[in-house]
Amino acid sequence: MSKSILEFIQKAAVKKEKLLAILLDPDKTDLEKLPKIALRIDSLNANFIFVGGSFVENGITDLFVKTLKKLTKLPIVLFPGDFSQLTNHADALLFLSLLSGRNPEYLIEQQIKSVPFLKKSPLEIIPTGYILIDGGTNSSVFKTSNTKPIPQENISLAIDTAVAGMYKGKQLIYLEAGSGAKVPVNSQLISAVKKHISIPLIVGGGIRTKEQLNNAYENGADLVVIGTAFENNTSFKF
Ligand code: 1GP
């Protein structure tokens, strides 16, 4: 793998090699179960482990990632719900701005709060435009950020939000239906957004089957994130 995780994702996107990340939420995953979980992830051909959640207690992520790092060779990418979930035991950080929302706390405040830590950190920082799409549930992103998702049928708003993110200098766009979404981001929306951006596209939320995974890939997702399906089903395989 190239040294930079962003570069690895960019190169894979150019070559149309599809990537998979398994999302672990430290709030929902027992530390004692991590050795087994790491083995399960190894058997899946995943490219990354994402770590993060909306309601993670302060300090838990540090020990969680430190423990996980010893159990896996996969790069660990932080996908934090807030700035308290930062740890130098990971390899990279999705530096998220919730572009679909109008809450300054998740557009810029949390990012400013993270700077004293990040100034001294070796973490690779990846500017990421995060766009919440209605997945048919009150997602935890919706609850914590108190921002409305973009309706699945409002494709033009999703496109313009993603393109604005790209113009602002984001290196990745993440279309998020919310963890445990009833419906994942639909094909039309994924392909429409993909057509309008020249940076890699991440898609996650509510993807539970091989068909849904392939559907996301075929419509333009460069990287798919799966959390709940992996969490709920110990014999989960694609
Ligand atoms: C959530 O996109 C991720 O942030 C994954 O969602 O838990 O529904 O797989 P799921």
Image: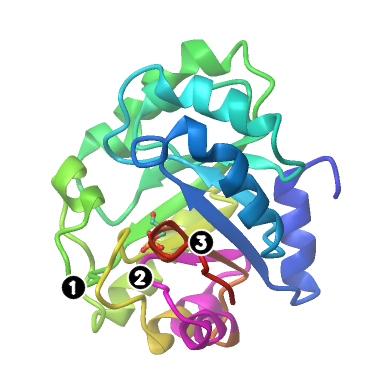
Give the spatial CA distance, label 1 vs label 3: 18 Å
Question: For ligand 1, which image quadrant applies?
Answer: bottom left
Mark 2 / mark 3, whichever is N-terminal = 2
At a point 28% along the width and 78% down the height, the residue shown is: 183
Location of mark 3 (residue)? 225
* Residue interval drawn in magenta: 192-217
Location of mark 2 (residue)? 206
> Local crowd at mark 1 within 10 Å, few (<14), some, or many (≥20)?
some
Label 1 close to label 2 by CB (< 8 Å)? yes
Does 142 sit left or right of 38 as displayed? left
Query: Residue 41, position in %: x, y?
Result: 63, 55
Query: Residue 157, position in %: x, y?
Result: 29, 72
Does 6 sit left or right of 101 as displayed? right
Give the spatial CA distance, label 2 vs label 3: 9 Å
Mark 1 / mark 2, whichever is N-terminal = 1
Q: Identify the element where label 2 is drawn.
A: loop
> Local crowd at mark 3 within 10 Å, few (<14), some, or many (≥20)?
many
The response on whether ligand 1 sits within 8 Å of label 3 is yes
Q: Amino acid at mark 3?
A: Val
Q: Is residue 203 magenta?
A: yes
Answer above or below: position of 124 versus 184: above
In-front residue for pair 22/37: 37
Q: Amino acid at mark 2?
A: Gly
In-front residue for pair 187/49: 49
Query: Residue 115, position in %: x, y?
Result: 48, 17
